[in-house]
Amino acid sequence: MDLETHLKDTPDDLAELILTVAECSRKIRDAFMGKQGMTDTKNIYGERQVALDKWADQLLVKRLGDDLDTVKTVASEEQQNILVYKDEDDPYNVTLDPVDGSSLIGTNLTVGTIVGIFKHHDVLSQGKKMEAAMYILYGPLNILVYTAGKGVHEFAMNKRGKYFLQRENIRIPNGKIYAPGALRRDYLPIHKKYIEMLEDDGYKLRYSGCFVADVHQLLCNGGIFTYPGFKGRESGKLRLLFEANPMGFIVTKAGGAASTGLGNILDVRPSSVADRVPIYIGGKKEIELIERLNRENI
Ligand code: F6P
């Protein structure tokens, strides 16, 4: 079944939005050949922008903001400000991480696109208010995963650029993979204990440096991804709006969970588009363990 057919029970305007991102992802895949270098510009975090990242941002912003009639605002990791379009009444507010893991482009490792979709809630709302979320993985295959609130579904792109259903209503399995971000020497004590417990329990290391890829493997094999708060940056590295919330929404809808280590990420109230958050995302069992360790040490 193709993506369009799969979306037949989804409201037309939301289906159109998801299909538009899917169409952009085909163009982004095609652009890998020509857009490998760096630009002279920096994003809001002061990081030099990768050419593909900037190009993908412009493509997505144009197609969603300018070309669709239903998108009111777009917040992108690559933009300084929230972009405002059209009428007050337009229902959708969208967050974009155009190319997550873009430092890996030069080494031809998998990168991704992450999209969060709010309906009648602004992008600074709690993640649990999201209507839908999706990501695309640019690996050996283009993989698209979306949830419009009910199940989590996975599609693969064929030679003609069309997405076909691979797995429907994905549930995160039990598994023993861990993907730990940050330097071990900077771990805070409870996180250090947590990682040691996973290792003692036989968890196997699988960390690519691309959040989307590292979380996608958990939907396939189970386990846990963490990018914790660490010495020198207790709020962690990953961005609440662009990374943690949409991926947390998807994993939660697949029967997993996403936590700051203290509580549900989807309950966090953002204070700005640039917020960062410590993240633990994956199986419920692994999330319960870090939350218990933190509770016992408070
Ligand atoms: O936030 C961008 C990102 O590349 C994520 O995709 C990834 O999880 C993380 O940063 C990797 O960070 P590091 O290079 O510190 O492992």
Image (spheres, rainbow, N blue to C red):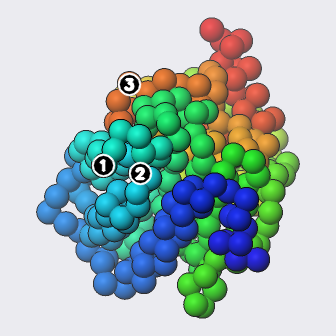
Name the residue nearer the viewer: 212 or 54.
54
Q: Is residue 125 visible?
A: yes
Secondary structure of the residue carrying numbered label 1: loop
Confirm or deny contact between disc 1 and disc 2 (CB under 8 A). Answer: yes
Q: Is 67 located above or below residue 200 in the figure?
A: below
As shown in the figure, which amino acid type bears the numbered disc 2?
A: Val
**Image spot of residue 212 (x, y percent):** 56, 57
Task: Name the residue tied to disc 2.
Answer: 71
Q: Position of residue 172 (x, y in %)?
A: 79, 51
What x and y, as percent, mark residue 133? 58, 50
Q: Residue at x 26, y 60 (%)?
A: 49
In the image, what residue type sits under mark 1? Tyr
- Outermost residue toward the right? 174
Quadrant in which the N terminus is drawn: bottom right
- Label 3 – label 2 distance at C-alpha: 22 Å
Q: Quadrant of the C terminus?
A: top right
The residue at the far top in this view is: 298
Residue corresponding to mark 1 = 85
Q: Could one spot residue 200 in this view of the protein?
A: no
